[in-house]
Amino acid sequence: MLQSIRLVLLVGLGILVTIGTAWAQPSGPQAWWPIQPRPLPLVHPLFSDDMVLQRDIKAPMWGWSVPGDAITVSIDVEKSDGRQIGTAIAGADGKWMTKLVPQRAGGPHTLTVECVPAESGRPKQTMTLRNVLFGDVWLCTGQSNMNWPVRLSTNGEEEAKQANNPEIRSFTVSHFPSLLPEKLPPPAKWEPCTPEFARNFSGVGYFFAREIQKTQKVPVGIIHSSAGATAAESWVSPESLRKVMPYDFNERLDEREQLLSSFGSDFEFFRAMEQWTAAVDPDSATKKYVSDLDLKTDDWLDITVPKPWEETGIESLKDFDGFVWFRHTFEVPSAWLGKDLVFDLSIINDVDVVWLNGTLIGSKQMPGIRSYAVDAKLIKPGKNLLVAAILNQKGPGGFCSGPSNMAIKVAKSPSSERIKLAGTWKAKLVTTITNLKQPVPAPALSHYKMISAQYNGMIAPLLPYGIKGALWYQGEANGPFWMQYRRLLPTLISDWRARFEVGDFPFLIVSLANLNALQTQPVEPGWAEIRESQWRTARTVPNTGLAMTIDIGDPKDIHPRNKQEAGRRLSLVARNLVYGEKDVIYSGPEFSEMQVELPKGDKIRLYFKHVHGGLMIKPGDEKLTGFIIAGADKQWVWADAVIEGDTIVVSSPDVPLPKYVRYGWAWNPKVNLFNKEGLPAITFRTDE
């Protein structure tokens, strides 16, 4: 049994760490920790310019406003055939949701979202979403092989240069493991398929979308949400794991709940950060350091920013590790008023909390570059006040980069105009790190191996966006637990199907590719069983499919580069299973039954589905390989295998009464059975 995961709250930085064996987490803050508080927007960020909405269904659309506000969604109001396609009223929690009138594939369209306040006195809000397509949306998810980008695939840079298809769009969810279900995904936007963007699309997702768009003649949207090294249980909701697999993950689910209870149920991280600064320095709250433009700062230091505070020549900061306040005032050009801005604050070591005119605009708990987006509503005519609380644990402290990296610019503007923030600021020392009595609050985030973490941070924020189906490339992390995976993968599928609310949507699985040295023994440890569990899921769970990649792996690399063929084979499955092209051959030979040849009983005949044009040996090979045989004692030996029509006969002089057969039972098996369409046979065993 896995060693229990323990929570260690480090006093000083309040860093969340879990320690164990197979599920150990690294110490220290993680790069994906939140950097900016984000108010719930009028329209969920999945709904933006360039998006693809699922055609032919009542596609959900949602956001947040003031309770009682009336929301309408209209399409192409600027055209003669413009019309209303959705309405909603914001509920008690401010959330509104509508189901749009089903639309046929096509576009581009313009959607207009209008919010009419329930009470007079507040202005009406209008949001326009342009270049919107209706088509098929596919969720692309799993581990690093789904995450692998186009640019790093075979001939990737050339593929990216040719990727110019306005009918394909992608929305990429950054890695964000969370202890609680998130309402918003990490900041992202829909990106059109141009060389600039497509080079970073999921390789498997893009090459699949390219085939589907070409053959089905409909727009295709990819929602790409994957993360390397993640186990399947991290992608399933805790409720489903408790209900369906109560004896598998209870201990880890209990540990997660203990972790939650130790931090309370609120988890409003950014509010907690403000409360923390007030607790560490009560004067800051009383005297309104972060909002009072007229604060008397005669007793504050004049300090050069940016520069590590140890190098400023100020004696009290020479060897100082601890908490320091910074204040600075600035003005923006009148032409910038009403525009969203970006504040580049150089590199900050280590923890920062930053306010603009009294409103928290960002916080991060690890050393690194700070660049905070600021809503236009926070910018005032005349003087504006920028305040930062910085905690340094050791080494250089404060703003630690060059002057050119401290500036304000207009967001999403091609202009190079910037307002310099470098110069003389005001600073005030509060306390050393050794005298810090209040640990820094930890955000409600987890490590990538924490159970349900990816579901909470990377799937829950997408629910219930209308999708056509899902592509799943995962299994490496669950390899040793293949028997459990037989139940876990179907649990994940049923969990997602219930939560996306589009019925039993198609779920297409990539069978793991070959890896490591070529097989030398009849049976070798590795991924044979996890591939079997994937095949078993495709056989037993309705509306699922399997794409074999056993022949296109890289023995020396867990990330095979040929994502084109992986995407193409998935598209073949989709074309047959989802799009009704029954003449499309989508699978290699699939074992169906066996028969001991009588009267001698010294041979076994194997029968297959998906033979199509006939069974064949890989071109260039002289005889079938990869088959092994055993009697009742299960002492496996290599088998002689011969194609006879649509069957294969296996035997061995060392096994006079064979009972069992296996094919491809290794990390990198010696397999060469295909059908005439060039698709590899599914690895199998008859003694399952």
Image (tube, rainbow, N blue to C red):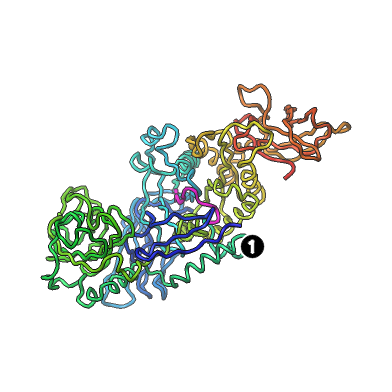
| Amino acid identity at mark 1 | Tyr
At 47% from the left and 53% from the top, the residue drawn is 55
Between 390 and 377, the one nearer to me in the picture: 390
Which of the 4 quarters of the picture holds residue 623? top right
Between 368 and 371, the one nearer to me in the picture: 368
Number of numbered discs present? Answer: 1
At 60% from the left and 43% from the top, the residue drawn is 546
Residue 280 horizontal/vertical position (percent): 28, 72
Quarter of the figure with the N terminus? bottom right
**Callout 1: 10 Å neighbours few (<14), some, many (20+)?**
few
Name the element at disc 1.
Answer: loop
Q: Which residues are magenta?
A: 222-233
Q: Is residue 46 visible?
A: no
Quarter of the figure with the C terminus? top right
Q: Give the residue pinned by disc 1.
A: 247
| 353 horizontally vs 19: left or right | left
Asked if the magenta segment contains residue 185, the reply would be: no
Residue 259 horizontal/vertical position (percent): 48, 67
Residue 175 horizontal/vertical position (percent): 42, 53
Q: Is 650 drawn above or below residue 506 in the view shown? A: above
Between 46 and 105, the one nearer to me in the picture: 46
Residue 218 horizontal/vertical position (percent): 46, 45
Asked if the magenta segment contains residue 229, the reply would be: yes
Q: Is residue 634 visible?
A: yes
Q: Is 556 drawn above or below residue 380 in the view shown? A: above
